[in-house]
Amino acid sequence: MIRLAIAEDHQSLIDGLELLLKYEDGIEIVGTANDGEGLLRIVQKKEPNVVVTDIRMPKMDGIQATRLIKKEYPHINVLAFTMFDQDEAVTQMLEAGASGYILKNTSLNEVLQAILAVADGKTYYDGNINVNGGEAKVSAKKGLLTRRQKEILALIAQGKTSREIAEELFIGIHTVDTHRKNMMRILGIKGKGELLRYALEKKYNF
Amino acid sequence: MIRLAIAEDHQSLIDGLELLLKYEDGIEIVGTANDGEGLLRIVQKKEPNVVVTDIRMPKMDGIQATRLIKKEYPHINVLAFTMFDQDEAVTQMLEAGASGYILKNTSLNEVLQAILAVADGKTYYDGNINVNGGEAKVSAKKGLLTRRQKEILALIAQGKTSREIAEELFIGIHTVDTHRKNMMRILGIKGKGELLRYALEKKYNF
DNA sequence: AAAAAAATACCCGCTAAGGGGTATTCTAAA
DNA sequence: TTTAGAATACCCCTTAGCGGGTATTTTTTT
């Protein structure tokens, strides 16, 4: 018997899943939530054995919720069900402990297959994401920047000047500017504001 | 008989709608598409009398598709079904000719009610959006900038320099910079890159 | 028609972000 | 241990975007 909990801020999608599963033998939906916190409450109350969760949700995202769930209830299997196909999203979700990852542009029948697989202790990955041995395959572009560069890029996205970044990281402003130059060269971008634009677009592209 | 076409890049959502409607008397789904262009093709081939469409989709967004549909087939009623609750999104969709607007975090049953209403020539608006006499109520913040300022802000978001904007709009660079200054004062923002950050956030926040 | 708002245009000064480049030290990988 | 990569740091110069301000013309509203 699969006891299933679903977290998804789009209620219409939950409704669709409920329609799909209402006549499915061996599956019982024990609770649904529209945000990450609601999911945790259901997990505490009902102890499902499978959780289907979106990533971007109000109050707490699916990555964080998965982390907390797997920590407290390692036997619960988590399936990510999300629009994000970026490697970074996949990586984070798998690192949080999810054993499956399905995209929303996939059919509901495939979602059902994934739920069954994950409930059986297996992994299940959407054909349109990159996964390699349980780890998301890092794209060439994603791996171009170093740890430090990514750290500085995030601060740039927050609108901090080089001086502010230097003070925050206890390094010289010249160092920050050098990182900027190196990143622009590596990413192949030029022009005023383009690094900031890149930083912001990357943030919203997960 | 309601002949329905659905455009939605998340196939799982289409599947849910199909499950909901398959036993509904008087409704026939004549086609589904995962992008705006596919929607137009279905409309040409099948001439549905109701279209349900998302906004953000590959190849052509729902606003543009709605415009084209209403121009060619004014008798087709369009219902927007989207995650965007911002006034601007509602405004644009209604101006394009949609007669209904439903959010995805609403239940599927309400989607059915909206489809029935819209098919009947009525309007139907999700309770969580602002609509006033068929026009989205424009928020105070949204109305702070003039037409021209918004035009320039959009070009800034594209990464264009003041010089490039000046050349494109056939005005002087000083004029562009003055618009920049005026916008920053009006929006209450300060600092290098902050206008660009605002422009980009506004873009992604619809 | 008058008043208000919007658009256009300009001056000055400052600085943050590029863009060209060099070099040394530290850390990780081979 | 050696090599390669990353991090740190600096110089020079240019330019684009602020930030302070002023003014005129055009368009819209009253």
Image (tube, coloured by chain):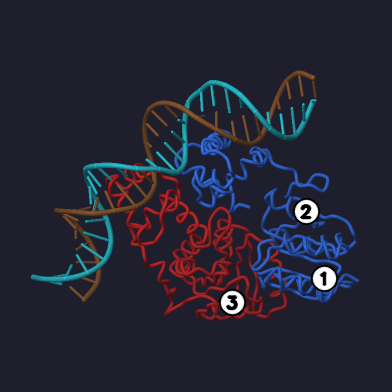
Chain colours: A blue, B red, C cyan, D brown
Distance from Cα at disc 3 to Cα at disc 2: 39 Å
Asked whether, in this view, residue A50 is left or right of residue A143, the answer is right
Q: Earlier in the sequence, mark 2 or mark 1?
A: 1
Question: Looking at numbered disc 2 in the image, what kind of residue is underneath it?
Answer: Leu
Disc 3: CA contacts within 10 A as few (<14), some (14-19) or many (>=20)? many
Distance from Cα at disc 1 to Cα at disc 3: 30 Å
Give the chain of mark 2.
Answer: A
Q: On the image, numbered disc 2 is attached to which residue? A: A94
Question: Looking at numbered disc 1 in the image, what kind of residue is underneath it?
Answer: Leu
Residue A52's mark? none
Q: Which quarter of the rendering shows the N terminus of chain B?
A: bottom right
Residue B56 lies, in percent from the top left, at 56, 60
Residue C26 lies, in percent from the top left, at 68, 32
Asked whether, in this view, residue D12 is left or right of residue A176, the answer is left
Count how many numbered circles sit on residues in the image. Answer: 3
Looking at the rendered structure, the secondary structure element under dot 3 is helix
**Residue B93 can be seen, yes or no:** yes
Q: On the image, numbered disc 3 is attached to which residue? A: B115
Above or below B7: residue A91? above
Nearer to us in this view, B105 or A24: B105
Residue drawn at the location 52% of the way across and 70% of the way down = B78
Q: Nearer the viewer, mark 2 or mark 1?
A: 2
Residue drawn at the location 73% of the way across and 72% of the way down = B19
Whether marks 3 and 2 lie on the same chain: no
Q: On the image, numbered disc 1 is attached to which residue? A: A4
| Rendering quarter of residue A28 | bottom right
Question: Looking at numbered disc 3 in the image, what kind of residue is underneath it?
Answer: Ile
Are the residues tagged 2 and 1 within 8 Å (C-beta)?
no
Above or below B199: residue C1? below
